[in-house]
Structures are given as C-alpha cells and as structure tokens.
Image (cartoon, grey):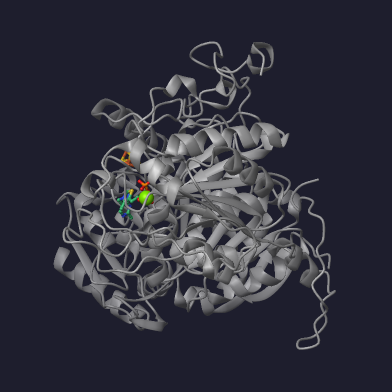
Amino acid sequence: MSAKTAGGAAAAHPPVHPQDHLLRTDRLPHIWCTGCGIGIVFGSLMSAVMKSGLPLNDVAVVSGIGCTGRMAGYIKLDSYHTTHGRALPFATGLKLTRPQGKVIVASGDGDLFAIGGNHFIHAARRNLDLTVICVNNLNYGMTGGQQAPSTPFGAKTTTSPSGSPDQPFNFCALAAACGATYVARWTALHIRLLTQTIGEALAHRGFSFIEILAPCPTAFGRRNKIRNPLDLLRFYYDRSVVKNKISPDQAVMDFQGNLVVGKFVDVAKPTWLDGYRQVNSGQVGEWPEVAAEVPIPEKHLLGA
Amino acid sequence: MAGKEVLTGVHFMDGDEACCEGAIAAGCRFFAGYPITPATEVAERMSRRLPQIGGIFIQMEDEIASMAAILGASWGGAKAMTSTSGPGFSLMMENIGLGVCTETPCVVANVQRAGPSTGLPTLVGQGDMMQARWGSHGPYEIIALTPSSPQEMFDFTVKAFNLSEQYRVPVFVMADEVVGHMSERVVIPPAERIKVVSRKQPKASPDKYLPYKPDADGVAPMATWGMGYHVHVTGLTHDERGYPVMDASAQEQMIARITGKIKKNAAKIISYDAMFMDDAQVVVVAYGISARSAKGAVAAARAQGQKVGLMKLNTVWPFPEEVIADLAGRVRGLIMPEINQGQVVLELERVAGGRCPVKFIGHPGGTIISPRVILAAAQEMLKEAL
Ligand SMILES: Cc1ncc(C[n+]2csc(CCOP(=O)(O)OP(=O)(O)O)c2C)c(N)n1
Ligand code: SF4
Ligand SMILES: [Mg+2]
C-alpha cells in the first residue's frame, strides 16, 4: 500500500509497513509478549482484510476480554472491545443493524468458550453472518495462565498446578455441531493458509469459525515442558497434520501426533436474517408444512 | 407486512404494550430480549411490531446477551432497547456498566416484581431502585424514569430514548408489575407532535475527531460504525481518543466526564409533578405505582381539609436534591411509600438532612401500598407536628 492511499489518518508516524494503514500505530508498542502467537494471527487478519477488497468503513472488529481481545484495540477500523465473553452478542446487535457490513469477532478460547460459551452455541445455531477468529493458546493468557476449556488433560496452569483434570473441548466439532457453516483450524505457523482461510471466511455468508492454535510462551509454555516460544510454535506445527473436509469430530488435538488442522466445513445455508425476512414476509407457511429454506441476498433493513 | 410506526389515536392497552409503542414512536428499531414475567408482553409485542416497520427483534439466549446486543445495535446506529424484570436486570449489570463507560445510548425497561431471587414473579415490587442506581460496579451516574400508568409507560419510554440519545447513557424505565399489566386509556399523539431526539453526529473530519471529547453540554458526538471514523470503543478506562490509559489521572478524567454530563444537566433531566405542594404541611414523595396510591391518599386528605401534598417523581435518578432540600425546609414532614424495605427513602432522608422528619411506608412486595395507610401516616404526621 502506498503512502498516498494510507495517508489522511491520524497515524503517529507516516506508514512504513504495508499494514500500517490498518494499524493504530499511535498505540504502539502493543502489549503482546515476545514470542506470542497473537501477533501472527493479527497480521494474517489484516492481510486478509486488505486482500478482501471490502470497503474498510464497512468492516468492524469486536473482541471480548483477554490478550487476544486486545486485537480490537490495535486495528484501525470501527472496533469494539466489549466485556468478557460477550463479543458475540454485541456483534449480533452490530451486524443486524448494518447487515451490509462485515463483522469480525476476534477473541480468546476462554472468552469465546468458557464465559461466552452459551453465546457461541447460539450465534452458531442462528448462522449469524459473522466471522469468528479464536486464538487458542490453551489457557487464560491475560490473567496469568489459568486453566481454560481448551487446556489439555494433564497440562499445568496456575489453577491446575498438578495438571488439568478436565477434558478440553474440540472447538471445531462444537462449532459444526451448533450450526457453523464454515469451520477451519490452523496453527500460527500456517500463515499463508490461515490468511487464505480468513479471506474465505470473510467472503462466506453465514457463521464462519477459525481456530488458531497459537503459542503463549509466557503463561502456558513456561509451566509446561516447552518453554522456548519458537520451540512451542514449531512443536504445534510439526505435530499438525492437514486433513481437509473431514468431520470435525475426527479433527482431534491430542498433541501426540494427531493435531489435525484444515478446513472442515464450508456449506451454504440461510442466515438468521434470511430466515427473519422469510418468516416476516409470510413466505414460510404453517408449521409443520413450512417451506424449504431459501437463501435471500442481504440488504440493509434500517433506514433508506 | 407494513405497519404504522406511530399508532396515533386513543387506545385501551396495558403498560407493557404502551412501553413498546413509546419505544417505536421514539425511533426504536432494535429489540433484543429474553422472556420474563411481568415484562414478557413487551418482548411479545415488539416481536410483532418491529418486523412490520423494518426493525429487528431477536430473542437472545439470556439477558446478558440481550444487553450486549442492544449496545452493539446502538453502535450500529440503531435506537435499541431491551426489557426485563429483577433476575434479568441482575444479569444485565455488567453490560450496563459497559454502556455507561462507552457512553452508549440505549433503553432498559425493568418491569419490577418482588425479589430477591425468583421472588414473586407475578406480583409487584419496587425493590430494584437502588440496583438501578448502583448495580453495576464502579462510579457512575444513571437516569431512571418511573412511570405510574400505561399512559406514562408510553410517554416516559419516548422520553427515556430522548434522554439516552441526548446524554449518551443507558436509561432505565423503572416500571412495576401493576403498571405493566394494568390496562387504561392511552393517547398516542400524531407523530409530528412527539418530540424525538437523536444522538449528535460528529462534524469534524475523521483525522480531527476525538470520540470522547465532549461539547459544551458535556456530551461528545457519536460516530457509529460505517460513518468512516474508525473509532475504538472500550470498557477499559480511556482518554478522549477512546484509547485505553491505565492510570489514576485518566480514570479521574473519564469518570468526571461520564458523571459530569448527568450532574451538570440534572436540572434539565429531573422531572416531577407537584400536587398541592405550595401550601402543604406534609408532602408525600412517591414514584411509580406507589405515586398512584399516594395520589389517592392526598386527595382524601384534601377532601377533609388537611394540607397534604404530593411530589410525584417522574425521574428517581438523578435524584431531585435541590427541590427536596428546599421542600424539607418548608414542610413539617415528608413521607415516602415504596414497595420495598426502604430504598429511595434513604436518599430522601439524606437530602432532607434533618430539616424535617421523614417517614417511610413500605413492605417487601406482593401488593400495592394502600392509600389508606399513606393517609393515616400523613394525618399522624400532621398531628405530631402540631
Ligand atoms: C466477568 C469477568 N470475569 C473475569 C475476568 C478476568 N479475565 C480477563 S481475561 C480472562 C481470560 C482470558 O482468556 P482467553 O479468552 O483465553 O484470552 P487470552 O488472554 O488467552 O488471549 C479473564 C478470566 C473479566 N475480565 N471479566
Ligand atoms: S500472556 Fe500469553 S497470550 Fe498473553 S500476550 Fe503473553 S504470550 Fe501472548
Ligand atoms: Mg486463551
């Protein structure tokens, strides 16, 4: 991106990096630790947004609370840093009032699946047209490394000092079971595939979910065996096997060599708003004799 | 399925229904909610009405989600509301705080029932008044209106939207089960006679605009999603740019702004009706359904030639400190009936500051306060004062 196209904004310095016009450079340095995987995902997200050709005034980013949740604070778009776990319902209201725009939800595994788990289930069920990016770092990074719904059995965290007694979720299987129409998983080292997948998810109409297994060397790695950030990144990458189009149930993450990544689900289904318009236009008929689902192109409901 | 936005005319409807019509007349086009007695009828009517006029109704998975969704809708540019009762109001508290901190206009109608916990789901209470004031953590100011009839459910809901848009703050319509469920005559004026206020939009260009720099009225213009301002909105303590700043001085400035805009404009926000207050020796200060009981008591006292007056609070928060302080210096006593164990009366006592006795009449809920009890208390107070 040339300095000319990137100019005009209240940046602290003239753009020196191709992604600067999407960054709040006046907020740098960021809070993320050296070796953290969130930055890679953030870079991928910015690349995908740039490549998507979407009008930037029509792209919003919503985050919950956590290290990952700080993404909303660094991206120079309309960006909303909400409460812990509530990014999805906030995004629901945002999206439904401006359906012509694209809403990206970027948040952590704890935010989206522990405190926000119920919202995730229902947002996926409704097939709301949202792109959800979940940085799975296997713990609560922001609060110093506690057990998360992603923490593998036996992994040490500050609240599971002898190893986690819980079984973790398979987020991709959960998303698919709840009704997500696009589901993928990569590690933070699959940068090109990740960027491409985010691009696809942005173009997808409906609830898209991308999980990224990313290192948190500070809070997770150092309490477990792999303390070096690069080693952790490489460990995830080396153990991963790409299996596209398999049932997400089979996309296990046992860290013993079965760390399945890939694109698992990509189907077209009517969104919540399609259904809302359909029922309110009287096209549905009386249950149980309801009409088949018909996707309807979106256009905004509010205003002229 | 086209429908009319403003149902101009004379209606016989209950308070919950009138609340919906007030919201729609004020421009509400987004409702997210979760069913709960005695507020369910608000959601039910909105689910019918909003699709008719191009709005969105969505039933969320809980009240936490409902509150978060209306904040999102507000940043999407819509006027948005939810309705609930005690248990749901409790669940909304964290995101009410987000609304306060991010200065997000929205309306929450709380049709109060008796608590705590599940309490008496179908029976009246006024026990959420202090929760409305202080329920979310941290220092803030809020606006709460207290309708006492279906007509006021309409009027005050319009007003709630206007105040929330003007001051960029969540506004509560603190109704109660009786007001929500009673049916009465409701007059809906022609659209052009209904005053509708919408949030200020920025005039500055995106490179000059500071999202949290207030104008002289204490309120900053609001750039919602899609206007091209690329604003960052956060519940972290933030500066005028909207950027998080983690120190005591940023905190002090932000709190001064979000509390100052309400305090500074309190005289404009506060609303009350005075009945026989000028020559009154004893004044009943009341709100919501208890103001209806009080009105009966005051009328009965006057019929007997006793100088009892009524101050009917239309806004409980901000509390009308100046008017009450002045009143306390002029009368022999103040009485407050509330369907709780004494909440707003604490504020009344504080503001009266010992200048006159303050008597509380209340019970923990399940029924209204009888006018007879208020009348007896007023007569007692008149006697004591002689
Ligand atoms: C209601 C509430 N409870 C707890 C917290 C404290 N808290 C902040 S972030 C966080 C966990 C974040 O974990 P995750 O979503 O995985 O994000 P990460 O930091 O790992 O990216 C918690 C528990 C909070 N902010 N709000
Ligand atoms: S604590 Fe972990 S997740 Fe948070 S910034 Fe540091 S490395 Fe990243
Ligand atoms: Mg995490």
Quadrant containing the N terminus of chain B in the rendered view: bottom right
Q: Quadrant of the C terminus of chain B?
A: bottom left
Observer-nearest residue: A52 or A229? A229
Picture quadrant where residue A8 is located = top right
The residue located at (39%, 37%) in the rendering is B258
Task: Give the percent coordinates (x, y) of residue B250.
Answer: 31, 27
Residue B375 in picture, x, y percent from top left: 31, 75
Tell me if residue B366 comes above or below residue B237 in the rendering: below
Residue at x-position 32% and y-position 76%: B115
Whether residue A36 can be seen here: yes
Asked whether A194 or A177 is in front, the reply is A194
- Residue B159 visible? The answer is no
Give the residue furthest to the bottom. Answer: A288
Q: Quadrant of residue B43?
A: bottom right
The answer to whether B15 appears left or right of B278 in the picture is: right
A260 relative position to A48: left or right: left
Number of marks in the rendered image: 0
The x, y position of residue B56, in whole percent, is 68, 60
